[in-house]
Image (tube, rainbow, N blue to C red):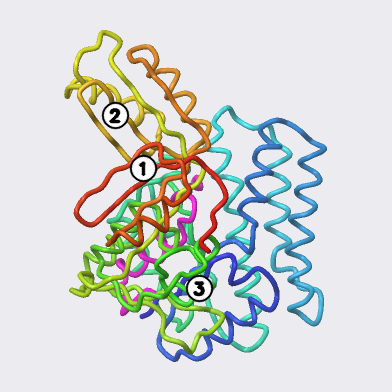
Amino acid sequence: MRIFKFGGASVKDADGVKNLAAIVRKYDQPLVVVVSAMGKTTNATEAIVEAYMQRNSEALNKLVSELKSYHLSIVDQLFDSNNGCIDALLAKLENKLSTEPSLNYDFEYDQIVPFGELMSTSIISAYLKFIGMDNAWVDVRKVLRTDDTYRSANVDWELTTAFMKEQFQGKRLFITQGFIGSTPNNLTTTLGREGSDYTGAIIAHALDAECLAIWKDVPGVLNADPRWYPNAEKIDELSYWEAIELTYYGAQVIHPKTLKPLQNKQIPLLVNSFLNPEEKGTVIQSSEQNSELQPIYVLKRDQTLISMSPKDFSFIMEESLSDIFQIFSKHRVKLNMMQTSALNFSVCVDENKRVEKAINELQHKFDVRYNENMELVTIRHYNEEAIDVIINGKDVVDSQVSRKTARYVLKASEWNFE
């Protein structure tokens, strides 16, 4: 068994769906194909959630109409005649949006946003059957079981493994969704933004798969995001250890939770290009090649740098740190970088609605200062030249350098690598 995962960019239009079919057709062994929502559908459904929660019916109707038109246009291009493969899902979505929302934003998010994955996989499964490729469409919510931590659900591994082993057999080809699961009460949950990679790893782990292959619009894992750093180069091989480090620092090519289930069973992760499927991508597995890696750059935009000091000028001790971590944990604010001194503790975090609430609570116990519109750059396997490339002409607000990693908090500004 192999597990393939295709992201939204790979199936953003009818040609993308046809390309997926051409790639899958080349493989004779059993496959589970995990697919994300098409194109920017997740952004679109998130906007629908906002309008729904604000009871803005005019905006809601417009957004739903655009979502329907986008998907039905792809359906029309794929099939010779009218195909109703997503009619029932669209009806369920409209029925949901006709009801009053609860007061739990995260719950409502998880009941609405997953329609993107359900529609994309329904279209793809129907198209594969249309061109003679037999497959089974699997509602992953029936087999991927989680707790009720909405928008960041935790997997029930025992139940999930048992259900998946029973479900994924008897066919050569299965089509299912990434990103979503369900509680024991059959309420839909999500695994966190960009969680489809993680879904692929969960299925690979449960089925003892030969490998997990993620198909992307890049030739493999690069040493930087080419949309930001034009001189990015492909890395042929990475160890699990190095890849986990990179995801921790914010590298977007792999979801942070993806690697652990694979490493536990020594299942290789392949990162391939759906644009050039014949070319060799990057393999992530047990490896000792990391000592010779080129510098790897990770940029995180939209950061807030928060600095906290005790109001009575006492030292930042374990008790103070415990209070700080508890507040950040309570508001589910992820710390991207930490820096401590005798009287000061600083963190760099993603800008979002939860950060303001955390800052308000921190101000009860600490003097808090913060800078918004920051950028955090991490350089793995740095050298002086690599550091100069990043900080030249930049306003450095904070830095942290260790044996293999250099990190810089910079005021956001235009990048120029000439």
Identify the amino acid type marked 1. Answer: Asn
Q: Is residue 213 visible?
A: no
For image coordinates 31% across by 70% down, the residue present is 294
Identify the amino acid type marked 2. Answer: Phe
Dot 1 and dot 2 residues touching (CB under 8 Å)? no
Per the rendered image, the range of residues in magenta is: 187-212
State the quadrant of the N terminus. Answer: bottom left
Q: Residues within 10 Å of mark 2 (few under 14, many from 20)?
A: few
Q: Quadrant of residue 252?
A: bottom left
Relative to 235, 293 lies left or right: left
Q: Which mark is residue 218?
A: 3
Relative to 286, 247 lies left or right: right
The mark nearer the N terminus, 1 or 2, is 2
Residue sitting nearer the eye, 398 or 368: 398
Q: Residue at label 1?
A: 336
Q: Is residue 122 visible?
A: yes
Element at label 2? helix
Q: Residue at label 2?
A: 325
The mark nearer the N terminus, 3 or 2, is 3
Magenta segment: does it hold 117? no
Relative to 382, 253 lies left or right: right
Q: Quadrant of residue 408?
A: top left
Q: Residues within 10 Å of mark 1 (few under 14, many from 20)?
A: some
For image coordinates 53% across by 89% down, the residue present is 25
Dot 1 and dot 3 residues touching (CB under 8 Å)? no
Label 1 to label 2: alpha-carbon separation? 13 Å
The image position of residue 368, as x and y in percent, is 39, 19
The mark nearer the N terminus, 1 or 3, is 3
For image coordinates 27% across by 35% down, the residue present is 339
Choose mark 3 or mark 2, whichever is in front.
3
Identify the amino acid type marked 3. Answer: Val
